[in-house]
Image: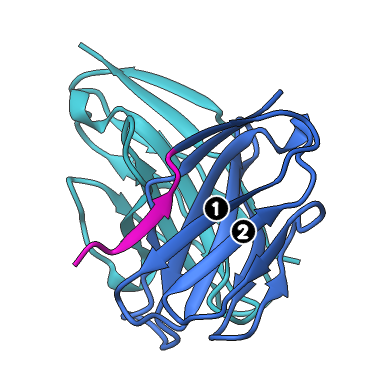
Chain colours: A blue, B cyan
């Protein structure tokens, strides 16, 4: 049981390049999330999904797109990377039930640098 | 709108001293509140949640609805407590979390 995994762990991009971050979970969770972590700003929600085939915008969605074609995977895309997107990206997943079974589990993070 | 404020970006205490990490929130309704911890080079993990009323690794947190606070406390800090701590609130559907800015706690020997 790997929990939440993220690929890649590190990436350096040049401005204007594109890339896709992959998140996978093996806990059969309905809900999945992408956050970015920046110093002094905590974690901010980029996009989320409440089930296969659904996505929704979070707090800071601009410049990102997502897809949830399979329940276990949630992809985050950067079409044209900008230096402001240099950050650590975390994926998370959650059961759709209420407390106390709704702990949100996090992946190990992807450190992205845009030059 | 939901909001979480952690007023201290950095907190440094000596081993054995008491620790208090502050968290204030704004939310209309009955929120779920959490403390998450991120040790060096590790992923975020849940430390405790207010509904459980439990003590994890010696930490406790009491929800004070009058002051809208959820401060994290430990009576005797240990060096292994050095980490980044995030307070978070859940509400608004889809089990979404809103995080505070985080407090980096350093325990000096």
Q: Which mark is residue B56?
A: none
For residue B59, side relative to residue B105 (left or right) = left
Q: Chain of mark 2?
A: A
Q: Name the residue: 55% across, 46% down.
A: A89
The alpha-carbon separation of the residues under discs 2 and 1 comes to 5 Å
**Magenta-drawn stretch contains A4:** yes
Which quarter of the rendering shows the N terminus of chain B?
Answer: bottom right
As drawn, which residue projects farthest toward the front? A17
Letter of the chain that mark 1 sits on in the rendering: A
Residue B91 on the magenta span: no
Could one spot residue A115 in this view of the protein? Answer: yes
Residue A88 in the image: state x and y as whole percent.
55, 39
Query: Is residue B101 visible to us here?
Result: no
Q: Are marks 2 and 1 in contact (CB under 8 Å)?
A: yes
Q: In percent of the image, x 71 and y 75: which residue is there?
A: A56
Query: Residue B28: which quarter of the image?
Result: bottom right
What residue is shown at x 41% (from left), y 88% (from top)?
A97
Residue corresponding to mark 2: A76
Q: Which mark is first along the chain, 1 or 2?
A: 1
SS class, disc 2? strand
From the viewer's perspective, is residue B44 above or below residue B68? above
Q: Tell me the quarter of the picture where residue A92 sits.
A: bottom left
Which segment is the magenta one?
Answer: A1-9
Q: Is A114 displayed left or right of A92 in the figure?
A: right
User: Residue at the spot x=43%, y=60% of the render?
Assistant: B34
Please give the residue where the numbered disc 1 appears in the rendered image. Answer: A21
Residue B68: x and y in percent read 59, 59
Residue A42 horizontal side relative to residue B70, left or right: right
- Quadrant of the snapshot with the C terminus of chain B: top left
Categorize mark 2 by other alpha carbons within 10 Å: few (<14), some (14-19), many (20+): many
């Amino acid at each position: 049981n790997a929990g939440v995994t993220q690929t890649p762990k590190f990436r350096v991009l040049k401005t204007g390049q594109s890339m896709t971050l992959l998140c996978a979970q093996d806990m059969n969770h309905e809900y999945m999330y992408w956050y970015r972590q920046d110093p002094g700003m905590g974690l901010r929600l980029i996009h989320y999904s409440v089930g296969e085939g659904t996505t929704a915008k979070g707090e800071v969605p601009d410049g990102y797109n997502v897809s949830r074609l399979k329940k276990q995977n949630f992809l985050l895309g950067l079409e044209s990377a900008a230096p402001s997107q240099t950050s650590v990206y975390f994926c998370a997943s959650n059961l759709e039930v209420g407390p106390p079974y709704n702990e949100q589990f996090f992946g190990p993070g992807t450190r992205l640098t845009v030059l | 709108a939901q909001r979480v404020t952690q007023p201290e970006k950095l907190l440094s205490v000596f081993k054995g001293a008491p620790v208090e990490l502050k968290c204030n929130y704004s939310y209309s309704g009955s929120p779920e509140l959490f403390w998450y911890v991120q040790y060096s080079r590790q992923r975020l993990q849940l430390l405790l949640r207010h509904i459980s009323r439990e003590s994890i690794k010696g930490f406790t947190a009491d929800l004070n609805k009058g002051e809208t606070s959820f401060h994290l406390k430990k009576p005797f800090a240990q060096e292994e407590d050095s980490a980044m701590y995030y307070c978070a609130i859940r509400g608004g559907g889809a089990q979404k979390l809103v995080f505070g800015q985080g407090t980096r706690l350093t325990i000096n020997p």
